[in-house]
Amino acid sequence: SNKRLTPIEKIQQSEPYRFFLSTVYGILDTYNQINAISLKEILSPEHGQLVRSAQFNYMFDIEFLREQYPPEFRLKPLLIVHGDSRHDNHTIKAQCSPYPQIEVCAARLDIPYGTHHTKMMFLLYETGLRIVIHTANLIQQDWKQKSQGIWISPICPKTNDNTNESKTNFKKDLIEYIERYRAKQLQFWQKTINEHDFSSINVHLISSTPGRHTGGDMNKFGHLKLRQTLKTYLGLENEAQYNSAPIIGQFSSIGSLGPNANNWLSKEFLTSLKQLHSSSLDSPELKLIYPTVDNVRTSLEGYMAGGSLPYNVQNAMKQGWLVNYFHKWKADHRQRSRASPHIKTYLRATNDEYKELLWFLVTSANLSKAAWGVLEKNNTQLMIRSYEIGVLFIPKQFSQTTFSVSDSSSSPSFPIPYDLPPVKYQSSDKPWVVDVAYKNQPDSHGNMWDPS
Ligand SMILES: O=C(O)c1c[nH]c2c(Br)cccc2c1=O
């Protein structure tokens, strides 16, 4: 049907996963109705009377952000949480200075090269508290023609019994994440989270905070939190059949991963991704999805999309071995093959048919040690540079043994963002690198790319 769904209808229809892609300007409207939502719709007055909100992010255009709030909510208190990189601090403070109702909190970044990647909203309504965890910067271009991931919580009702935890420990994990900022302006939100009933939440929180995490803190963040959560909660019947089940990583940037797969990618990181209840020595296939130059050139934005895919040539040159893992960005079933990915997702399928999933993660974390952490000091500490946050979907929390991907099965199929199985790079395909020129083929707007 070509009926336009209201924001509330979109959220109802997205149950039980509540996992959306951002709407895309320029595709058939039906593909912007099902499991697709805009920033204005997330902030719609339909959800209730907003009291105040907080916006955690990396890049901000405050005028754009204010326009996405309904006019009647633009005077409500708003807390902006960003990274404290010098120049950024200045521009954000300057942008917010005309608005006394907007407070600014600079997240401490005590480890060099760390960034505040976390993209999260706290929306406090008169009826309760909603958490949104997503992948889009608060700038217009991130919400127009890209593929972004968004998880929208139910509105959690106020309670005076602060034990209302979810079966996934989401409340405690979120409070522990916020506590790591050690920021005065976040104390109100720690208290507010504590005063709301999170029992309806069915996803796990996977976050990263800067630090050298040791002892009891080692499994609280980064890829060790993912490892621990999978080990504790996957609970599959005769799980040995899944020891070689394939794993996918999909992201919009890549860090320096070393001279070969063996030191971090396929040892440390893959060991976490492949975790079942019991560990196994099998090394399952890891497939990585990252846009080719042609994906970017032919995208709706053209080469400009590549500005948000900051994989630099310095790193790319050092790790040519990585290209063997690469697969293209392809999302025909969502009509988003040309909506350049800024979403980051990780998943494990049950086998090479990719008809069912063992789990699915949507997060701000790219493929980098800074985001996921790297083990140091003989594996006694996990060093993480950045703030990241994501949500992990595990079938058991939805009373299912696996998530079905195709609509054929009975249980509600999981709305995956891209086509499965992934399509390998052809020999002529190159990964997009942001700081080199592409001048032999014009993009979808007839332009070339010359960063110099
Ligand atoms: O986490 C994010 O959202 C991002 C982090 N770093 C970026 C750089 Br550096 C250049 C261009 C875009 C991004 C970006 O989108």
Image (spheres, grey):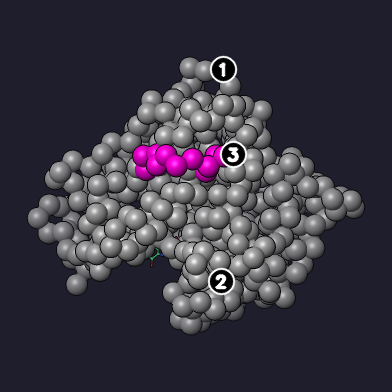
N-terminal-most mark, 2 or 1: 2
Residue 156 point in image, percent of width and height: 76, 46
Horizontal side of 237 relative to 173 (left or right) equals left
* CA–CA distance in space, label 3 to label 1: 26 Å
Instruction: Name the residue rendered at 29%, 46% in the picture.
Output: 325
* CA–CA distance in space, label 2 to label 3: 26 Å
Q: Is residue 334 above or below residue 74?
A: above
Q: Which of the 4 image quadrants contains residue 214? A: bottom right
Please name the amino acid that badge 3 sits on. His
Quadrant of the image where one finds ligand 1? bottom left
The residue that disc 3 covers is 277
The residue that disc 2 covers is 212
Q: Is residue 306 magenta?
A: no
Instruction: Name the residue rendered at 36%, 39% in the picture.
Output: 285
Q: Is residue 280 magenta?
A: yes
Q: Which secondary structure class fits the magenta region best?
A: loop
Instruction: Tell me the crowding category of disc 3: few under 14, some 14 to 19, or many 20 or more residues within 10 angstroms, Cα based.
Output: some
Please name the amino acid that badge 2 sits on. Arg
Instruction: Name the residue rendered at 80%, 57% in the picture.
Output: 194
Tell me, yes or no, if residue 247 can be seen here. no
Instruction: Tell me the crowding category of disc 1: few under 14, some 14 to 19, or many 20 or more residues within 10 angstroms, Cα based.
Output: few
Tell me, yes or no, if residue 113 can be seen here. yes
Q: Which residues are magenta?
A: 275-286
Q: Secondary structure at mark 2?
A: strand
The residue that disc 1 covers is 410
Nearest to the eye among marks 2 and 1: give it.
2
Ligand 1 has an atom within 8 Å of the beta carbon of the residue at disc 3: no
Q: Is residue 385 above or below residue 156?
A: below
Q: Tags 2 and 3 in contact by the CB under 8 Å rule?
A: no
* CA–CA distance in space, label 2 to label 1: 45 Å
Across the whole image, how many numbered discs are drawn on residues? 3
